[in-house]
Image (cartoon, rainbow, N blue to C red):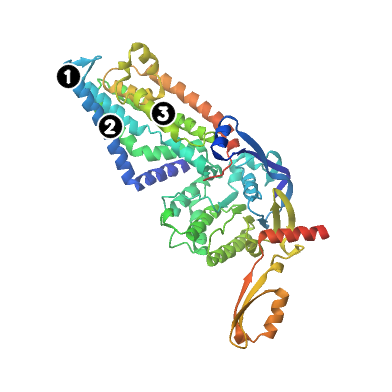
């Protein structure tokens, strides 16, 4: 179980004055300001849950993951994962955790991914037969056979992320933290990863916490949702119990042919789309494009809904 | 076993960058050749057989050994650690059940392994001491000095938690290595008073001392072994302290 109580994390940053005059001033009198990245948060995640953590850029998502993995120490309050304090970096705790940072690689850049994996097998003290069985399963599931022996620097982003996932899961962790795992990936690879993570959660009862600023990621993956805005969790609950649905504000861009053969385009909401479909003959519909709402719009809507309740 | 695999990975990585290694070796050899040529011309032009109780043959031996040890005792751990802190890559080590010191040490031994073999072989061949005991003591001393030097480099590397750029330090460390390590001239040439203190500095302990043992200027290594042990303990204590404070400062944000 993951439990945080009155969790706060602050750090110091510098204020840089612009121009040469500012640089000269800063050289002698550097100004600092304290930034509160997380503000007195209290959350609970049960074992085996698939939790989505969303929030706009700079909301504190990565900071939260770093606190859960022990890279950062809480300023005040506490984080308990599996009855341990992550900040102590105990070997027993680290054995149970798997992490993937979409923007940071844990693979040796100059070596093939298999060399890093072989090293991880020794680090996590995996028996040879168990390691090979797990490796084969993961390689097959993620379709990584073709590039597992290629130097990492020669891999595409999608191939690298798949290798990163294998690294994060090779030791069968109880807790899996994924920070923006689908960043920059094509749709097909994203689908592949979603399917794989679902299977991992189902088969091994792995607790998965996935951060993203793509609502689609969370909709596809999580049963529980955490929304973090400006360092504060504004929502925690089941994804299907949200007061507003992420897809509610989707709009549809429809291109169709008029009776005199001209091409026209209209923007419709979900209700109007049904009406449009009934009125327009199918052979006159050229294209229908769905535009999802932005995370910022969704959160704004959620706020409004909560204030109305 | 896990650290052995990390060492092997370090060695394999080293072989990946063949041209870098060859360039590094050529540069070091060139530097050594220039020092030798300079000293030979000094010997010939002065018309003296010995300068500061060293003949030309001993001087060449001395310069070859100090320059060879300079390749073995590399300053690379400073910049590997600093790079990991600045890029946020240290996070990877922090997330694994391994020690930062152990991982860096294993990688350092792995990358320096070919030079360890070359240096040890050459020391055995060059040291024509009457008893084999001193040769073995010298090899033991070098292993201890290797760990001490690595610890010192890691201590300097931990400063990257506070300094944004470590590259201005590179020239200072190179200068220390060249002058205090005796890569241009034996430290004893600086005069007895200065030499008495400088001979126990870490750079001298890893290059000047082995060179003086080979050229028969030192027959008793015990004061130097004590000096290495003191430096080792000191660097380990400072490292433990700095890493503890530094990790708290580390935000894992990278470029």
Residue at image coords 60%, 54%: A178
C-alpha gap between disc 2 and disc 3? 18 Å
Tell me which chain the residue with mark 2 is part of.
B
Percent coordinates x, y for residue B250 in the rendering: 57, 39
Disc 1 vs disc 2: which is toward the camera?
Answer: 1
Tell me which chain the residue with mark 1 is part of.
B
Residue B45, which numbered label? 1
Residue A151, which numbered label? none
> Which residue is the extreme one toward the bottom?
A259
Residue A223 appears in the rendering: no
C-alpha gap between disc 1 and disc 2? 21 Å
Secondary structure of the residue carrying tag 3 is helix
Q: Which residue is mark 2?
A: B31
Within-10-Å neighbours for mark 2: few <14, some 14–19, many 20+: some
Badge 1 and badge 2 in a common chain: yes
Does residue B7 sit above or below A59 in this rendering? above
Give the side of residue B16 with respect to residue A65, left or right: left
Tell which of B110 and B153 is nearer to you: B153
Residue A112 appears in the rendering: yes
C-alpha gap between disc 3 and disc 1? 33 Å
Secondary structure of the residue carrying tag 2 is helix
- Image quadrant of residue B56? top left
Give the side of residue A40 with respect to residue B76, left or right: right
Within-10-Å neighbours for mark 3: few <14, some 14–19, many 20+: few
Percent coordinates x, y for residue B238 in the rendering: 52, 27
């Amino acid at each position: 179980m993951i439990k945080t109580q009155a969790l706060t994390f602050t750090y110091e940053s510098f204020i840089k004055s612009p121009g040469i005059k500012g640089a000269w001033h800063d050289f002698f009198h550097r100004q600092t300001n304290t930034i509160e990245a997380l503000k007195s948060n209290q959350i609970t995640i049960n074992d085996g849950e698939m939790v989505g953590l969303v929030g706009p850029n700079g909301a504190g998502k990565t900071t939260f993951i770093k606190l859960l993995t022990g890279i950062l120490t809480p300023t005040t309050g506490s984080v308990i994962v599996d009855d341990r304090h992550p900040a102590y970096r105990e070997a027993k705790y680290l054995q149970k955790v798997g992490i993937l940072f979409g923007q940071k690689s844990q693979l040796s850049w100059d070596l093939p991914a298999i060399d890093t994996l072989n090293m991880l097998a020794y680090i996590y003290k995996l028996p040879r037969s168990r390691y090979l069985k797990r490796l084969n399963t993961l390689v097959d599931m993620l379709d990584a056979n073709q590039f597992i022996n290629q130097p990492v620097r020669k891999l595409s982003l999608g191939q690298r992320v798949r290798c990163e996932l294998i690294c994060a899961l090779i030791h069968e962790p109880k807790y899996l933290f994924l920070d923006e795992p689908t960043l920059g990936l094509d749709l097909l690879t994203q689908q592949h990863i979603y399917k794989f993570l679902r299977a991992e959660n189902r088969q091994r009862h792995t607790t998965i916490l996935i951060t993203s600023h793509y609502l689609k990621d969370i909709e596809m993956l999580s049963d529980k949702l955490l929304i973090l805005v400006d360092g504060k969790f504004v929502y925690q609950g089941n994804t299907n119990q949200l007061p507003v649905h992420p897809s509610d504000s989707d709009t549809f861009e429809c291109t169709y042919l008029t009776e005199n053969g001209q091409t026209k385009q209209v923007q419709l909401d979900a209700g109007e789309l049904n009406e449009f479909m009934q009125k327009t003959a199918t052979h006159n519909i050229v294209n229908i494009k769905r535009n999802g709402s932005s995370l910022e719009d969704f959160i704004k809507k959620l706020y409004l809904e909560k204030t109305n309740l | 076993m896990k650290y052995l695999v990390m060492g092997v990975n370090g060695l394999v990585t080293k072989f990946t960058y063949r041209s870098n290694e060859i360039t590094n070796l050529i540069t070091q050899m060139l530097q050594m050749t220039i020092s030798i040529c300079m000293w030979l011309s000094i010997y010939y032009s002065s018309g003296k057989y010995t300068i500061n109780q060293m003949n030309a043959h001993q001087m060449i031996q001395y310069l070859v050994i100090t320059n060879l040890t300079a390749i073995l005792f590399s300053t690379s751990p400073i910049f590997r650690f600093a790079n990991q802190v600045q890029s946020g890559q240290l996070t990877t080590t922090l997330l694994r059940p391994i020690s930062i010191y152990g991982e860096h040490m294993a990688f350092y031994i792995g990358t320096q392994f070919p030079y360890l073999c070359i240096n040890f072989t050459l020391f055995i061949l060059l040291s024509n001491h009457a008893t084999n005991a001193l040769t073995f003591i010298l090899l033991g001393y070098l292993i201890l000095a290797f760990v001490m030097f690595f610890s010192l480099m890691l201590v300097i590397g931990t400063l990257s938690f506070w300094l944004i750029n470590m590259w201005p330090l590179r020239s200072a460390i190179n200068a220390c290595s060249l002058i205090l390590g005796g890569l241009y001239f034996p430290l004893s040439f600086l005069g007895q008073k200065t030499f008495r203190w400088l001979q126990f500095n870490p750079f001298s302990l890893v290059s000047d001392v082995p060179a003086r043992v080979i050229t028969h200027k030192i027959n008793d290594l015990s004061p130097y072994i004590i000096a290495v042990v003191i430096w080792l303990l000191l660097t380990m204590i400072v490292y433990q302290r700095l890493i503890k404070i530094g990790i708290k400062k580390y935000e894992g944000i990278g470029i």
